Image (cartoon, rainbow, N blue to C red):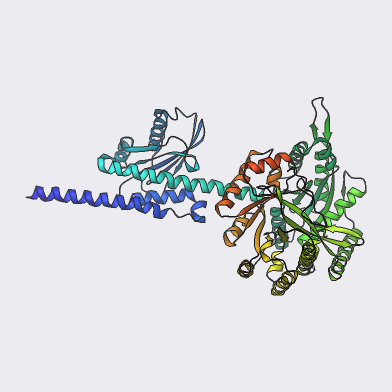
Amino acid sequence: MHASIVSLATKLRSVAVDKDILLFEIGLLEKFVITSEVIRDWRVYVGRLLEDINSVIEAHVLFSVFQIDDELFDVEIFWHCTPSEAARGQIERSIRDALHADTRFGEPATLNIHHHTPDNERAMTLAEQDAMVLRIKSFFVDRPRIGNIVGIGVHSDALADHTHSLVLDSILSTLLNVVGSIKAIHKYTRELEYYATRDPLTDLYNQRVFWELLGYEIGRSQRHNTKFTLLLIDLDNFKLINDHYGHATGDRFLQRFAEAVSSALRGGDILARYGGDEFVVVLPETDVEQGYAIAQRVLEAAKSISLEVTPGGEQIHGSVSIGLAVYPDHATDAKDLFLFADNMMYRAKAEGKERVSLPSPEDVMAVFRDVSEMGVAVLAAVNERRVIPFFQPILGLKNNRLAAVEVLSRLEINGELMRADQFIEIAEKIGVIHRLDAIVIEAALAKIKDSDYDGYIFFNLSPRALVLSEFARTLRTVVKASGIAPERIVFEITERDTVKNLSLLERFITDLKSEGFGLAIDDFGSGFSSFHYLRRFPFDFLKIEGDFIANMLNSERDRVFVQSITELAKALDIQVVAEFVESAEVLEMLRELKIDFAQGYYIGRPERQVTLSQTLSAPT
């Protein structure tokens, strides 16, 4: 009688354990919730999964195998208790043997093995170590899955039971997908974050990060009562290199230049590519004499560059003009300091190039007098409505026809037309950016109303203007008076300026959408917060940062990045616009990637008029 009761109890325990295992397997899918914490600390997440497994069965080890290439595998080994060196070696040999025995892989040339141990201090016993190899179950797939995962395995005492072993097969299959997916998203997110902070051509910090680091350095210098120097570097005659030898040679020269300047700087100095052939350097804890000495080293590094450009051995050499500004001697505001260095750089150009322009006390007064005069000129131009819209065509790649135009602002000052990049920061600083935006919208819609153009109209708007209730009322009045349907109007938003009240911006954008206006996110990929904007706001169009488009022909990584952004946008039902399209080869690649629209000088330059008959450079 006693033996029967014991047998029945054993069976009931077995059934209960089986039920727990099955419920755990179902629960795995519920745990597959992607959060920023999971993506950031995916290894911690897998370690917690191992803890969960141990709540239903005893399992000392969980490992995953990722195939990097034909001869390289990454192995992540997670321990439920602290292993001895012998146990580590034992599991490594077991994984190597399993890969070697599988004909799909052969013997991998290299295994990068990473062990992850828990915070608890329980050590593995000798008995557990002896049983480990006999009770390891591996699950491999024919080809790399999501995240390049090819296999997963577990050590468990439950393998001694045939039924439990079968259930573990199913659990491992589920874990393969869960771990692979999290690793893939982790890798993709890290790459996006990297590209959001780096210039894709030179691998230096980009303009957006430069401004953040400049602001940080100002704060640090204020706290410690120290100085720092800002250098603004501009390549001399770089346009001639591009025009004569082509953009590919120009790109090689920029890469060589970035390497040369980096070697001339000290550890801790910050070098960034500001854009085109302009570079900036922040020299922490550096006064004017020290800054001048380092600028001279940069000057010599640039002169030492020699790039062979023809089979016959023809070479090109470089030189730079450098402007210098010191905090707080020349300015205490980030933009004013940059403006001062910029003025010094242009003075170096005017004095004959290939030199460092060192500011004198008189220069400080002259620069800020010029800035003040420029502010007065911009204010007068806005007050007198000397704001002129220009229209740049956007080509629809499905039908090869003009599908949209982007409206760009020009200011008429002293009889000359100034581009937006020459006055927009001043307009924001003196508080007239919302008035400038409203004037250019009104003028552009009036021109379009009188034309035969009937496509989309893209407008750039500052987020600062959007959150002003006065601007919102003006915008509605201007559009209604034009008689143009809101459905044709698309507002481009960037995160170039930090908006502290995102809720207010979100409410205004929601109102715009409800009234039929379209919404585009501009320069996507230039800042990591682009993804935050994409998640929060209901965009209709996504404009990919132009640097990635321009470099697709020379960089496989940039091409993959553009492809990934395009696939993401299409999954979210967002149409994609590629900027900086400057050649037939780039345009053809965009067609292959099934991108919706193309914009750039190859498609057409900004013009004062827009009509259906507007000539497009791109072949039809």
The answer, for residue 315, to whether it is visible in the render is yes
Residue drawn 49% across and 56% down?
Answer: 35
Left or right placement of residue 570 versus residue 324 in this view:
left
Q: Position of residue 337 (x, y in %)?
A: 80, 59
Q: Which quadrant does the C terminus fall into?
A: top right
Query: Farthest top residue?
Result: 312
Q: Return the residue nearer the eye: 395 or 366.
A: 395
Compared with 373, 588 (above or below) is: above
Give the image quarter of residue 494: bottom right
Give the image quarter of residue 527: bottom right
Q: Return the residue nearer the eye: 203 or 355.
A: 203
Left or right placement of residue 529 versus residue 382 in this view:
left
Q: Position of residue 97 (x, y in %)?
A: 39, 30
Q: Position of residue 488 (x, y in %)?
A: 68, 62
Q: Position of residue 1 (x, y in %)?
A: 6, 50
The answer, for residue 119, to whether it is visible in the render is no
Q: Return the residue nearer the eye: 364 or 173.
A: 173
Query: How many marks are shown on the rendered structure?
Result: 0
